[in-house]
Amino acid sequence: MSILATIHRPEDLGELDSESLVQLAQEIRQVLVDSVCATGGHLGPNLGVVELTIALHRVFHSPSTPIVFDTGHQAYVHKLLTGRLPQFPSLRRSGGLSGYPKRHESPHDLVENSHASTALAYADGLSRALASRGAAQPVVAVIGDGAMTGGLAWEGLNNIGASGRRIVVVLNDNERSYAPTVGALPEHLRRLVDRAGYPAVVARLGSGASDGSQPVAPGRDATRGVSLFQAMGLDYLGPVDGHDLDALETALRQARGCDHPVLVHVRTEKGHGYLPAVNDEADHLHSIGVVDARTGAPSSVPSRTWTDVFGDALLAVAERRPDVVAVSAAMVGPTGLRTLAQRHPERCIDVGIAEQQALVSASGMAMGGLHPVVAIYSTFMHRAFDQTLLDAGLHRLPVTLVLDRAGITGPDGPSHHGLWDLSLFAGVPGMRVAAPRDAATLVEELDEAVEQPGLTALRFPKAAAAGALPALDRVAGMDVLRRPPNPDVLLVTVGALAGAAVEAADRLLAEGIRCTVVDPRWALPVNPALPDLAAEHDLVVTVEDGLRSSGVGAHVARAVADTGVDTPVEVLGLPTEYIAHGDRGGILREHGLDPSGIARAVAARLSVPAGLSGIRDRAEPDARVRRPA
Ligand SMILES: Cc1ncc(C[n+]2csc(CCOP(=O)(O)OP(=O)(O)O)c2C)c(N)n1
Ligand SMILES: CC(=O)[C@@H](O)[C@H](O)COP(=O)(O)O
Ligand SMILES: [Mg+2]
């Protein structure tokens, strides 16, 4: 009989004996492997926190005691223990369970944002709110060693250490982000482990606590010296074996009894209990697609992605440009830098999950004569907007940002879609943003970027790289992809949606609507020749995998209007909304950014009655559509 099937809420854990708990952990691991291998997701991180999450929910009483998961990618076990086993097969699927905590799914879920290093600040805030109501319960924050390398985590720790409030920081130390965690912190954690004669719970009895449970150690561990955390005002408990349920519960109960901030240092293994993950040198199956559960190997041969194209293109640039270096924020592999790191380790700098550090250190590198290429997912680059604007940008430094996962990403949901980069970077004086439409233009635009004296960026999505889309001509730096005689419409396509735009134009041509299609290549700032091109058409339609309200299209409309050209501009893009997780293609289709949607939008704007394949024959040339003389 499955024990997991009897767990509908954390309280159900309380009745289980040690033997049942061990069986429960085994059942959870089996569910994780069977289900996540079928849906994709964060298998490695969740396999590593099975015992920890069981212990957390046995010792602390969520939701009255808030438990915050940093980044949230390791909250699957939490979901299984809070009544969501039946829905688990829908993980990350459109309409199904989110791959991160989701407030509407459960009162046990608090933080939906998948950006790392926020949990301690949340805990500080939550504990202030609880204290303001005279509430006695602690707040628990579970943070990984990788997330602990993010600056925001230290801002949180700085406040927690001085708070005197009951906050339990659980540091899940598996020595990895994707790859082994970098910097001085892992060194310090290793020293704490070595000197404690790990595994051992090194707590000693200390001051009493409000709820009468075991008191805890005063500010020193049982061996010698002071941990970084104690120096910051927290008690330190650990290191604790994160796969030993008894040791975990002992330490967590002691932490619960603490009447001031305490950090429990838990040692876990990412992928624990599943050999394909433990043996995966790259990232212990941190984030997988659909894989064979027996081997952990992808179930289908992955297509060549934009990331692959970028990685190869950067390698070629690095071979000829010794001043070019790559900078990563703990994502060397996922951003395509692995080969460069292998061939030129000294020219691939991993700063940890620290995007602001990445941008400012890159600015320093540029001041020192290097040309850094900073490869950070679009969504994570939000963290470093200020540094892009006022460090790299203000000093007009030769820094190139490469924004992978730009546009709709899909299964990782609203805090992973890269919708804001075009809007954000449009406002950086002197910054130029390219959006390649295929592999050839990515290579070309990267080459151009590293030749430019100032701040540049390239952006591309999480997808298979688009097939070749050769240009018919290049006009003022813009690539002409379709140019029928006497065109009615100018279709301005940004980046990877070019294929959809060209297909839409071909469908429209078959219905008698003639569209010029241009790819501006360097989408921002708007090409000054674009308004003149607009003037030769009766309608401009822009298409982008970015925000309608403030992306490239909005700036094209502004530029056209500012030059006195009266051609109307229709902007196609994404709404200014938090778009739920799902499949990238399905989300784009839902928002009319597939060929049919684009064609329908053009026809509608020309007031062509809807009909065949979404577009009907144009009964009458629309009076509004002024044909050039
Ligand atoms: C600001 C930010 N940058 C990058 C990421 C991508 N990311 C997701 S999980 C992860 C590694 C997290 O490592 P750790 O906190 O140690 O958790 P573990 O997976 O080891 O449990 C990274 C870099 C992110 N979520 N947020
Ligand atoms: C949790 C997190 O932020 C990343 O691991 C994220 O899942 C990246 O996803 P992909 O690399 O699969 O796009
Ligand atoms: Mg880790």
Image (spheres, rainbow, N blue to C red):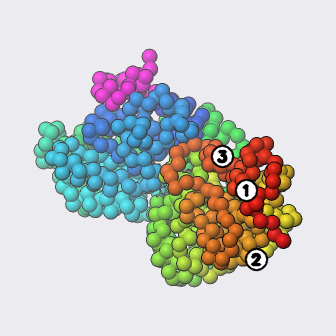
Which of these two is toward me, 271 or 475? Answer: 475
Q: Say which element carries label 2.
A: loop
Instruction: Report whether the residue tagged 3 is closer than 8 Å to ligand 2.
Output: no
Which of these two is toward me, 101 or 344? Answer: 101
Q: Which residue is mark 2?
A: 476
Determine the CA span between mark 2 and mark 1. Answer: 28 Å
Mark 2 or 1, nearer chain start: 2
Name the residue located 66 percent from the left edge and 77 percent from the top edge.
564
Residue 218 appearing in the image: yes
| Neighbours of disc 3 within 10 Å: few (<14), some (14-19), many (20+) | some
Name the residue located 82 percent from the left edge and 64 percent from the top edge.
487
Which numbered circle lies on residue 589?
3
Q: Which residue is mark 1?
A: 606
Mark 2 or 3, nearer chain start: 2
Mark 1 or 3, nearer chain start: 3
Determine the CA span between mark 2 and mark 3. Answer: 32 Å
Q: Kindly report the secondary structure that dominates the magenta region of the rendered protein.
A: helix
Residue type at mark 3: give it: Arg
Residue 383 spot, x, y in % from top left: 46, 63
